[in-house]
Amino acid sequence: MANKGNSDTMQQGTDSTGHDTTEKSESSSELEEKQTGLSGDSLPDNVPKEDDDAVQQGTVSRSDPGHDTTEKSERSTEPEEKQTGPSGDSLPDNAPKEDDESLLNIQKPEEDTASDIHEEDVERDENVQPKIVPVNNKIFWTAAAVVLLAVVCALCQRSPDSTPPVQKEINVVDVFNQEMKKLETTFPNQHPELWRRSLIHLRRHLKTKNPTEPVSLILTSDHRAEKTLGCLAQCLARAFSTAHNTSVLNINGKNKASQDSVQVKLDIDSELKKAFEGKKSAAVIHHFEELPPGSTLIFYRYCDHENAAYKDVFLVFTVMLDPEVELTSNDSLGRVEEMVQDHIKQKFVSSDKSAMFNQMDVDKLGGLWSRISHLILPVAAEKKIEEQGCGDRGKSF
């Protein structure tokens, strides 16, 4: 019994010694935990959960002293990590998870900021880009409108009396020049003055953009060149109409010589009006001297300079002289004009007295003559044409 009591006493002593050691360890741990906080201040003692954990840890430390030592080193390390954060400030002891998240969150704002900036740039580009296109289009169309307006104004300011544009010269004058060169080859026996004067006279009219009066001339010959006269007049009118891409009207005075003057006048008026309002820009009045005198007064309407009914047209009159008259190459143009005028007066005027309104007299003939006699040119006979006729260039006159 005594031995048992001693053993019990020794066991209690051992237990008390271990228990004292445990209490000391727990006390030291509690003091360390109190001394280490977020800012170095002591933590409150009345934390029941941590005390319970400390008791449990104390129990474990009795059986495993090595574990107690390891735990102490881990606890001593953890307060150092808690005390030092990214900025050097102490962190709370009970927020390890928040500390880790805070460290992770430090990097997130930079990534989010770069992403947000990129998104803002994209949104800004999307918002700005559609606005650029309408502005550029507006500037383009405005500039185009200004240029078009300037061109229109320049065209409107051109004088109506100015020379026609290059396009018209190519299509009209150049074509006419080519046709006239062909005529010179076809009629080699004609005087050079005929080609020079007729070319100048007709080309001046063709070059005028808006003619103020028609153009006309008189071709004359003696009976030796009767066929050549009609053929040359036809070809000359065709050269003019070809430049205008039109055709020619032919009126033969021989066929109307015996008809009523008033009716012939009405017929000529109707034919000329229909031709000039249609697709004909030239007319040849063959054997003008054979027309009934009163009927020729209709040409006042078509040859009265600025008062003429049609201005962009060409009228050719042919006059055959008396059989006893012969023209030579030595006759001047002035002399030829006198011969033609005397012949027409002899045919149209029977006396110097005034006639009725629809009949020819000296005064009326003088007015008509001044309107149709701008240019009078003599025609020489072409042997081939006199023998074979005008051929494919037109019928024989």
Image (spheres, helix red, strand yellow):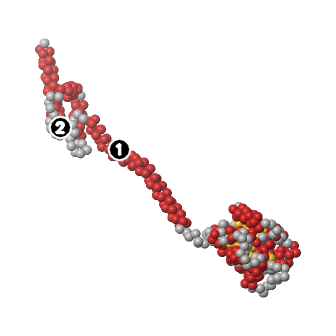
Q: Nearer the viewer, residue 236 or 1?
A: 236
Residue at the image position 12 percent from the left and 15 percent from the top = 5
Instruction: Please identify the residue farthest to the bottom as the structure is shown.
Output: 330
User: Residue 224 bears which disc, if any?
Assistant: none
Relative horizontal placement of residue 170, taking residue 15 as reference (left or right): right
Please tell me how many numbered marks the rendered image carries. 2
**Quarter-wise, where is residue 29 in the image?**
top left
Q: Secondary structure at mark 2?
A: loop
Label 1 belongs to which residue? 112
Which numbered mark, 2 or 1, is in the foreground of this view? 1
Instruction: Please identify the residue farthest to the right as the structure is shown.
Output: 387
**Quarter-wise, where is residue 387 in the image?**
bottom right
Q: Quadrant of the N terminus?
A: top left
Q: Secondary structure at mark 1?
A: helix
Position of residue 55 relative to residue 3, above or below, is: below
Residue at the image position 20 percent from the left and 41 percent from the top = 90
Residue at the image position 74 percent from the left and 64 percent from the top = 266
Residue type of the residue flagged with mark 2? Thr
Residue type of the residue flagged with mark 1? Asp
Residue at the image position 66 percent from the left and 71 percent from the top = 304
| Mark 1 crowdedness (10 Å alpha carbons): few <14, some 14-19, many ≥20 | few
Relative horizontal placement of residue 42, taking residue 163 as reference (left or right): left
Mark 2 and mark 1 lie on one chain; the one further toward the N terminus is: 2
User: Residue 36 bears which disc, if any?
Assistant: 2
Q: Nearer the viewer, residue 119 or 152?
A: 152
Q: Quadrant of the C terminus?
A: bottom right
Q: Nearer the viewer, residue 345 or 252?
A: 345
Position of residue 264 relative to residue 60, above or below, is: below
Percent x, y of residue 253:
79, 70
| Alpha carbons under labels 2 and 1: distance apart | 36 Å
Position of residue 317 relative to residue 91, above or below, is: below
